[in-house]
Amino acid sequence: MKKIVILGSGAGGTMAAAHLRKQLSITEWSITIVDNDEEHHYQPGWLFIPFGIYTREDCVKPKRDFIPKGVEFLLDEVVGINPDQNYAETKANGKLAYDILIVATGCDIAPDEVEGLEEWNADPEGNEHTIFSLSGALALAKRLKRFEKGKLVFNIAEMPHKCPVVPMEFVFLADWYFRVNGVRDDVEIELVTPNTGIFTKPIATKVLSKTAEEKNILVKPNFDLAEVDTSGKRLISPSGETADYDLMVSTMPNLGADFIDESGLGDGMGYLMTDHHTLKSVKYDNIYAVGDVSNVPTSKAGSVAHYQAELVTENILREIDGLEPKASFDGHSTCFIVSGYDKAFLFDFNYKTEPLPGKYPFPALGPFDLVGESHMNYWGKMMFKWVYWNLLLTGKELPLEPQMSMAGKFWPAFAK
């Protein structure tokens, strides 16, 4: 019997397992998922916890509830990969031989990478926070309840980080949250970013910058973070430029697993060096990447993991049938951006094409508006949690193509 081993049972690993188990004979192919955590986190939900929209229970379920029948789940820690001898090394189970390896170990915050954040922990009494962990989101929820005056800064510590639209969502929701609580006039909100603007795509930047201006949200671009002076409550750049805060929320640096670099598969940041279109390791023919662990130049987001899982499944099946894998991944990402007051934007883009106006997922019909802001987009975002738990993780078919479609999209007048 041949063996597929999947490292990681987050969104990408679980979806890949579900798609593959449906397609491969259980008598010919075994599928094993390895993960060191029993809990599956709906990571997009962490954003909403500080604002009282979601709770811990909305965002956490047992991983075993989503492991497909016929897939073995090993609760174990991966400590290495030997790509020359085709095995993964784990703490408890030792060597796991594979014919095909899917790496889906994601990435995690690394506060130790920034001077001043080494002692960070999820402290509701502290002034330095993050929403890129469950404990951080829960602590921030308690801190925001007591924050009624001062300067709130959301800092993008460095790129890449999980879900690049989250910083904009956070400051937009913060504007709504403080207005609802009657203290917005006493709270200054600023986004401090190393990027040249509020976002990395020109059309999206123009639209989101206008929204930030209307909400009286400041944007400080081109700020590279070198240090956090927690006693003085200020961010410091390599050139000595500073940004003061009373409460700071950070993406933190995000890194992949050490063992990926140690195996010779990584890029120095724990991300697997991945062919941008086949999603194979650039070094080994029988290793694929799915989700945040890859170093492909697109968003580290759930929609990307979904599209990648489908295309990796297709390529693995092609190779089993003796065909060449398709170089078909185009960097497709679909992101709702909540803007407060039960409204949201929706961006759909890929490596080459930035977000364009139109309708999604059905051209001319929608029901969601691309680039534009609408209530329907907001309810699409909120509905996604149910879709995630009940459809995506179980490998159900959705009317969403892995490759980006240009049907129904158009260039706005200001971009021509």
Image (cartoon, rainbow, N blue to C red):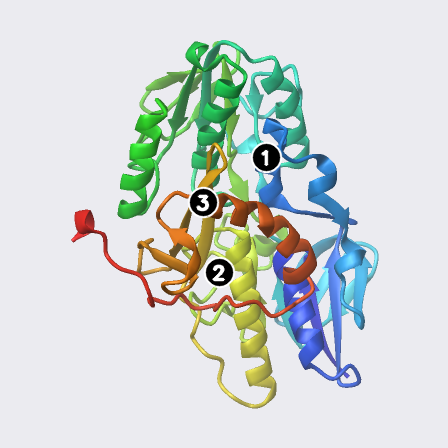
Q: Residue at x 66, y 19 (%)?
A: 124
Tell which of 199 and 186 is nearer to you. Answer: 186
Viewed as shown, does residue 72 lie left or right of 187? right
Q: Amino acid at mark 1?
A: Phe
Identify the residue position indicated by label 2 in the image.
273
Query: Which callout, 2 or 1, points to the residue nearer the camera?
Result: 1
**Mark 2 vs 1, N-terminal side:** 1
Q: Position of residue 279 (x, y in %)?
A: 49, 68
Spatial CA span between label 2 and label 1: 32 Å
Q: Amino acid at mark 3?
A: Pro
Secondary structure beneath dot 1 equals: helix
Tell which of 230 and 20 is nearer to you. Answer: 20
Identify the residue position indicated by label 1 in the image.
48
Tell which of 263 and 386 is nearer to you. Answer: 386
Q: Quadrant of residue 215?
A: top left
In the image, residue 294 sits, relative to residue 71, either above or below, namely above
Q: Position of residue 163 (x, y in %)?
A: 49, 45
Query: Which callout, 2 or 3, points to the residue nearer the camera?
Result: 3
